[in-house]
Image (spheres, rainbow, N blue to C red):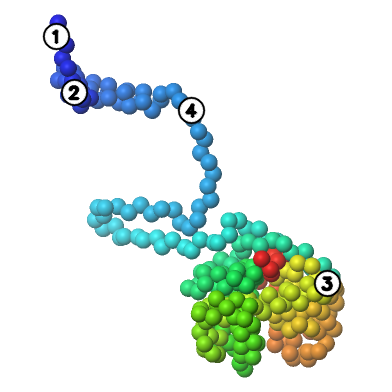
Amino acid sequence: MKLQKFRNPRERLRSARRGCPRGAALAGAGLAAMAVVAGPGPVTAQQAATLSGPPVQVRPYVSEPGVPQITINPGTPSPFPSDTGGAGTGGGGTGGGGNVGSSDALNTMMGTTWGNTAVANAESLGVNPSALAATCVLESGCQNVGGSGTVAGAFQMTASTYTAMINQAVAQNPSLAGQIVPGLAGQMDPATESIAASEYLLQGAQSLENNGVSSPTVLDVRGYYNFGPQGGQQLAQASDSEPVSNVLNMYTPSQLAANGITAGETVGQWRSSVAAKIGNASGQSVLS
C-alpha cells in the first residue's frame, strides 16, 4: 500500500477532517491540545512580586459601542523598595534613628510635579528624602504658598534663612548651582527651596549629633527647623513630661501659640502631635 506523505501538520489535519465529522475533528484537536498542556515536565511556583503603580492597562483595539474609553495614568513609583519607617524616639535626646526609606510623607511629596527633583536634591546633600518630605507636609502640606512676613514656599523658610542655606548648599555641592532659580524668586520655586530646606535639615542633624544626640531622627530635628539651633537642641533632649514653655522659655506664649503650641502643652504631647501628622517618617534618620 502506498503511504501518503504530508509536508506539514496542517495538511495532516485537513486530511483527518475529510474522513470524520466536524465535531469529532474538533474534539480530537482539543484532546491533542490538552495532552500538550498536561505533558510531563518540571512545575515552577509563581513568585510574589511587588506592584509599582497600577496594573498594565488593557487597551482594546476595537471599542464596544456606547462604552467610554478609560485611561489609567500610572503614578510615580517610590524611589525606595520598602516601607521601613519607625515611630518617634520620644524624649531624652537618645536619638536612635537609622531607618531610611519610604513613608506616607514621601508619597505626598512625590505626588507633586517637583517631588522627584526634591528627592534628588536631598540625596545629593546626604539627607533622607522622607525627612525633607515630612518637612513640607508639616509646613504647608507640600503646597507652594505664602506665609507671614518673609516666610514663603512649600518649606516655609524665611528669606534670610533661605538665602543662607541655598548659598551654603551650593558651596557644599556646586553641581546644584545650575538647578536653582536665582534670587528670592527661588524661595517660591519648590524644587529650588527643597535644596535650602535639605541643607537646613543637614545642619540641624549635625548640630544635634555634636551635642550628644545620636543619629537624630526627623522628630528630633523638627524643633531645630522650627525654633533654631538653641530651641532645637533643648527640645530634642527634653523629657516628655516637661512643659514646652519651660524648655523654650526664650519664646513668649504668643510666639509659641503661633507655632501651634498651647498653654501647658508638654514636650511629649508636642512630639505626639508632630508624629501624628507625618506618620512613619517621624522615627527615620535625617541623614541618609
Instruction: Determine if residue 108 is in view.
Output: no
What residue would you read off at disc 2?
A: 7
Residues under numbered marks 2 and 4 in contact, where contact means CB atoms less than 8 Å apart: no
Q: Earlier in the sequence, mark 2 or mark 1?
A: 1
- As drawn, 163 above or below 204: below
Mark 1 Cα shell of 10 Å, populated few (<14), some (14-19), many (≥20) = few
Q: Which residue is mark 4?
A: 42
- Foreground mark, 2 or 4? 2
Residue 166 or residue 44, whichever sits in front: 166
Between the C-alphas of marks 3 and 4, the distance is 59 Å
Amino acid under disc 2: Arg
Q: Depth-wise, is mark 1 or mark 4 nearer the camera?
A: 1
Q: Position of residue 166 (x, y in %)?
A: 60, 83
* Closer-to-camera residue (83/257): 83
Give neighbour class at mark 4: few <14, some 14-19, many 20+ (Cα, 10 Å): few
> Disc 1 and disc 3: Cα gap in Å?
98 Å
Is residue 113 something one can see in this rendering?
yes
| Three-letter code for the amino acid on which mark 3 is drawn | Gly
Would you identify the image quadrant in which residue 22 lies? Answer: top left
Say which amino acid is labelled 4.
Answer: Pro
In the displayed structure, would residue 53 be above or below residue 279?
above
Closer-to-camera residue (112/117): 117
In this rendering, the label closer to the viewer, 3 or 4? 3
Query: Would you call the spot at circle 2 few (<14 residues within 10 Å), some (14-19), or many (20 or more)?
Result: few
Q: Earlier in the sequence, mark 2 or mark 4?
A: 2
Question: SS of the residue at dot 2?
Answer: loop
Where does the image place residue 81, in percent across and percent down from the top left? Answer: 58, 56
Say which residue label 3 marks. Answer: 212
